[in-house]
Image: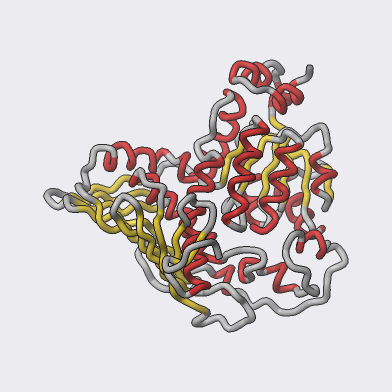
Amino acid sequence: MNRRKFVKTAGSSMLLAASYNCVPGANDRLGVALIGSGRRGRSVMDLMLKTGRAELVGLCDVYDVQRRRAREALLKRGEKVFETADVEEMLARSGVDAVLIATPDHLHYGIALKALEAGKHLYLEKPVTHSYNQGPPLRDAVRKSGVVCQTGIQQRSGKLYKRAKEEIFDRKKLGDIIFVRAVWSDFAWQRRTIEPRPRPAGLDWERFIGPAPEVPYQWARYDAWRNYRDYGNGILADLLTHWADVAQWMMDDEEPLNAVATGGIYHLEDGRENPDTVNAVLKYRGGWNLTFECTIMPVNVDRDSVLFLGTEGSLELFREGYIYTPHKGKAQRIDADADLTAEHVNDFFDAIKYGREPSANIEIGLEASRPAYLAVAAYWNGERMRFNGDRTAIERLSQTGPL
């Protein structure tokens, strides 16, 4: 049995380790296909290649221009790679050991299920699903597949975050934590003016629409898909997912009970549906609130961060470091010394090599998304929303039964 067969089908850590290490030289690199070759996909794939532990074996995207951009950014002059718009065609190729899925959110679920069925290791960007009810079947499919599934919650691999967890939270240096405040703002890319244009010949509109409601071609829906509910849940899914995961991890509490949210399109009247500004408050079982404040607009804040306020001190945690301020004593700043996504990519490869769980497995990916689903439901319904008794659906706090 060759190395690729071992990597794809092995079920134990011993077998996986043997399969990864048995062939010296270039062949011990994993063959990774990029599915969704936009900005995020190209960035993560670039970091994968820079580790020296992966080789790019395929580019899959519904738009040929994006495939060309990925080819130019990721391959050396003269190198060639298999390209297609057809996910099934890509997954059927024997050289594909793993896939990086960085498509619009509404395509994550269906493509992930196909990749798992094909036995491919999976790096799945967040949010891992587009709707709450997709979570359980995706989790079950990962468990059944026996492959490694790393979700794009990259702070879980960060040494900085692990240090904060161990040195501050596990030692209870903040006392009783009452409030957690998360702030994130200023996204120039999402403020762009999207001018109409004819449908490009190389854009497979039907594949882009996928499981979403069928609508006539509109360039803005493709080029700015995060603005539309059919394809993404906007800044609540893009950003609350990350900061809620940080808060839940540090607080050892993954059970948001209910949420309220308000906001709107205050500044960008360009046809978008998702808000450009939003505030959400989530109540947790452990007796604390998470407040999330976010806008696409260029407001001036010191940094995007999660701030924990306790009875004995505070901690501000951000991508570049953290600041611990005890009530009695001097503030201490610790700076990060590594790229979060690079650490996360290496953790993915280590999980495959040693047959272990990755740092952000499917459970963590789904737990990170739950607060976003609650907040999205609260925003669109204009009411406080909660999970029902068995957490299979989201409902109004004042009602029984699913929406």
Visible residue check, residue 17 = yes
Look at the picture and state if 309 lies above or below 346. Answer: below
Q: Return the x and y of residue 127 as percentages of the image width and height.
A: 57, 53
Q: Return the x and y of residue 306 as percentages of the image width and height.
A: 36, 56
The quarter of the picture where the C terminus appears is bottom right
Which of the colour schemes (rainbow, by chain, secondary structure, one colour) is used? secondary structure
Identify which residue is drawn at 39% across, 71% down.
300
Left or right: residue 143 versus residue 389 is right
The quarter of the picture where the N terminus appears is top right
Identify which residue is drawn at 65% across, 17% down.
15
Q: Return the x and y of residue 84 as percentages of the image width and height.
A: 84, 49
Q: Return the x and y of residue 160 as percentages of the image width and height.
A: 38, 42
* Outermost residue to the front: 400
Number of numbered discs visible in the structure rendering: 0
* Outermost residue to the left: 328
Q: Identify which residue, 180 or 390, lies in the foreground.
A: 390
Look at the picture and state if 256 lies above or below 118. Answer: below
* Outermost residue to the right: 201
Identify which residue is drawn at 71% across, 53% down.
37
Left or right: residue 361 versus residue 165 is right
Identify which residue is drawn at 71% across, 18% down.
23
Left or right: residue 227 versus residue 254 is right
Left or right: residue 41 versus residue 255 is right
